[in-house]
Amino acid sequence: MKGGAAISVLMLLGACAPAPVETAPADTDAVARGRDAAARLGCGACHDLPGIAWPKGRVGPPLAGFGARPLIAGRLPNRAPQLAAFVTDAPAMAPRTAMPAIPMKRAEADDIAAWLLSLDD
Amino acid sequence: MTERTLPSEGWPPAVLDPAGPYSEPVTLLAWVLLVGGTVILAIVLAALWVALRGSPRLKNRLGGEKAIWILGFAFPSVVLTGLLVWGLLLTSSLSAARVPEGAMRVKIIGEMWWWRVHYQDEQGRETLRDANELHIPVGQPVLLELEAADVIHSFWVPRLGGKMDMIPGRTNRLLIEADAPGVYKGQCAEYCGGPHALMGFVVVAHAPAEFARWQASRRPADGAGGEGLALFLSSGCAACHTIRGTPAQGLAGPDLTHVGSRKTLGAGILPNNPGTMAGWVADSQAIKPANRMPPYHQFSGEELQALTAYLVALK
């Protein structure tokens, strides 16, 4: 009886688990290129970037675990297209932010988005 | 994931990759000393091995009068005398005691923890002030007059020339030259306190026509700047920084008249773009701890945007 109760509790808890999210396998080349582009552009001047020792800026939020965050800047869904657009031209999407539009190639923005979305811890 | 540092491209600078006639002999000398020192160390270790483990016959020869004369007297006399003569000739050929006719002259003053750059005409009159970045034409020797405002620094752009200390109260002279157009990074090479390791420098070498264009582009700001300039003037920035063509005439920090056209920010350490500019203005202390610019916590996001947009437009 006791065992049966435990099993039903477990089943109930199991029902609470979110449906497994289907994630596309990360493009590891894009992730590596994105991390290098972020370092080269100096994103660390404002953000603490995982895997990059210096600089560790404090103006913007640390980016560790960014891929697990639901929203970009608390207002946009954290998906690749929106993220690539945001890192290039943040003021267009969040007008009162301090993060300026940063000149970069479209491919660099896509790579940086892929890298950010790969950060899950 | 391993922690990596990827600062602005080419910094810290390559040390054994000479790119001009005042750097090549220094690199050659360094290699000769390294290889020669290694060979001599091997000879000493071999002699030590013979002395400890060698056969009695070898030990006798090593301790004999002939070996003492050759290895103990003749060899070091010849090698050290040769090196002394060669080293003196080599360094005197690089010396700024004989400055080539018509060489461009620039005074560079080391500060904690950045560089003033004062371009001069042939009579030594100042023609232009800048900071942290030196533009030169390729294929021409450039005479640097090196001074220090506070403590001892050392000017070093390894690909273009030797290393020269900057000493308060003295003017030291150094010649540099670049064979090809490009960006050459430098680094303060004498510990000068605090963020010494983050005191970088940039030399940009241009083809002659390009250099003339660069010189012609060094005009004062036009004085227009809207909200960004107004914030610059009202927030205290102008107390330390000059922007020629505006009321900003501060002298404590780097001249910002052309800051938007610089390759780097923070004295050679960050790439220069609107993002790094905003980060530097708001909180340079997180990037270059203990540098003399205070963090600016009073700006709203929009104000920081306006200030950043103004500064990056100062070409």
Image: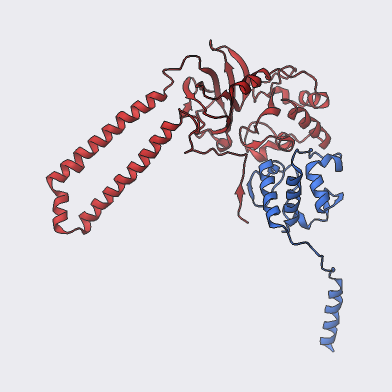
Chain colours: A blue, B red
The picture places residue A115, in percent across and down from the top left corner, at: 72, 53
Please indicate whether residue A100 sits to the left or right of residue B142 in the image: right
**The C terminus of chain B - image quarter:** top right
Query: Residue extending furthest bottom?
Result: A1
Q: Residue at x 33, y 43 (%)?
A: B37
Q: Position of residue B99 (x, y in %)?
A: 45, 17
Compared to residue B259, the image places residue A47 above or below, namely below
Q: Is residue B301 left or right of residue B51?
A: right
Q: Of all residues shown, which one is farthest toward the top?
A: B123
The quarter holding residue B183 reads top right
Q: Residue B304: in sight, yes or no?
A: yes
Q: Where is B5 relative to B124, above or below?
A: below
Looking at the image, residue B192 sits to the left or right of residue A90; the answer is left
The quadrant where residue A47 appears: top right
Residue B114: percent from left, percent from top: 59, 29
Is B40 above or below relative to B232?
below
Residue B287 lies, with reference to residue A121, above or below; the image says: above
Return the x and y of residue B284 as percentages of the image width and height: 68, 36
Label total for image: 0
Q: Residue at x 34, y 30 (%)?
A: B87
* Image quarter hosting the N terminus of chain B: bottom right
Left or right: where B107 falls relative to B44: right
- Residue A94 appears anywhere in the view: no
